[in-house]
Image (tube, grey):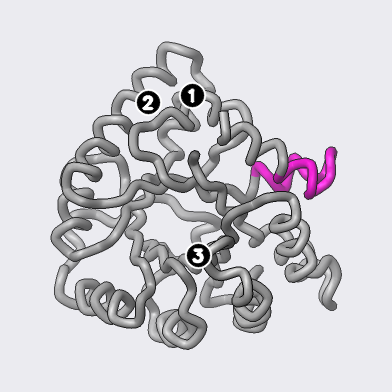
Amino acid sequence: MVRLSVNVNKVATVRNSRGGSSPSVVEAVKVCVDAGAPGITVHPRADARHITETDVREIAALLAPMRGRVEFNIEGDPRPALLELVHDVKPDQCTLVPVRPGEVTSQAGWPSTTPRDSLGRVVRALKGVNVRVSLFVDPDDAPIRWAADLGADRVELYTERYARAFEQGDAAARQSFARYSHAAELAHGLGLGVNAGHDLDLDNLVLFRRLPHLAEVSIGHALVGHALFVGLDESVREYVDLLRG
């Protein structure tokens, strides 16, 4: 079964828009776990516009007794402050993502031209403290081979291309899905696990859940948006049920 990792950034965004502590990110995590989510994702950015360091530490403490049942994934750019936090809380997985100044959300995966030395050291250091490392990449051969050369454990395929293609109709969706399938097969052949995320939802997952070797999808915006109408518990359950097929 494809595992769901719920990204709770949007809960923090709502909280921070007003200040204070409501809605509680930790309570949202509890609801997600109780509804059957086998994973939780956070992406603490340098400007702390949603998830904060305090959130990360509180979530880590909550999930610690559930280790082996619920995975904690911290994603972000490999800036010193984030890496220090990851090394301190030791999540199950760290997804390294390139960040462009001023971006609202991730816009692309790591280019294969990214210098290997410094990022390779980051990957080795994380693996040295038993943190699984995933690299956020586009569904292209070069960055997938680059990720394998760096010693990553997994890649997370950036799925915005697929989501936009899906909106254009069945033919475009299937053509894009074939491209992602090739990328997943290549990654698997190179010894990499396959994750995916960005703009996946209840509609486009019906096809995408069939991706070869897909281990995990990270979903936040669509899931939390759906929760505004059906409740967070029900939204998580719908995604979990869909991924179970």
Q: Nearer the viewer, residue 17 or 7?
A: 7
Circle nearer the N terminus (2, 1): 2
What whole-number distance in Å separates the C-alpha atoms at marks 2 and 1?
A: 8 Å
Tell me whether the residue at label 2 lies in contact with that at label 1, contact meaning CB atoms closer than 8 angstroms. yes
Circle nearer the N terminus (3, 2): 3
Q: Provide the residue designation for mark 1.
A: 207
Report the residue at 50% width, 65% height from top: 73
Please tell me in which quadrant of the rendered image residue 222 appears. Answer: top right
Disc 3 residue crowd, few under 14, some 14–19, many 20+, Cα 10 Å: many
Tell me where residue 204 appears, x and y as whole percent: 54, 28
Q: Nearer the viewer, residue 80 or 124?
A: 124
Under tag 1, what secondary structure? helix
Tell me where residue 137 appears, x and y as whole percent: 32, 51
Under tag 2, what secondary structure? helix
Please tell me in which quadrant of the rendered image residue 40 appears. Answer: bottom right
Residue 221 horizontal side relative to residue 97, left or right: right
What whole-number distance in Å separates the C-alpha atoms at marks 1 and 3?
A: 24 Å
Tell me whether the residue at label 1 lies in contact with that at label 3, contact meaning CB atoms closer than 8 angstroms. no
Q: Provide the residue designation for mark 3.
A: 73
Tell me where residue 213 appears, x and y as whole percent: 34, 38
Q: Provide the residue designation for mark 2.
A: 177
Report the residue at 38% width, 51% height from top: 156
What whole-number distance in Å separates the C-alpha atoms at marks 3 and 2?
A: 25 Å
Under tag 3, what secondary structure? strand
Above/below status of 128 relative to 119: below
Above/below status of 186 relative to 63: above
In magenta, the rendered stretch is: 222-236
Answer whether residue 233 is magenta in the image. Answer: yes
Tell me whether the residue at label 3 lies in contact with that at label 2, contact meaning CB atoms closer than 8 angstroms. no
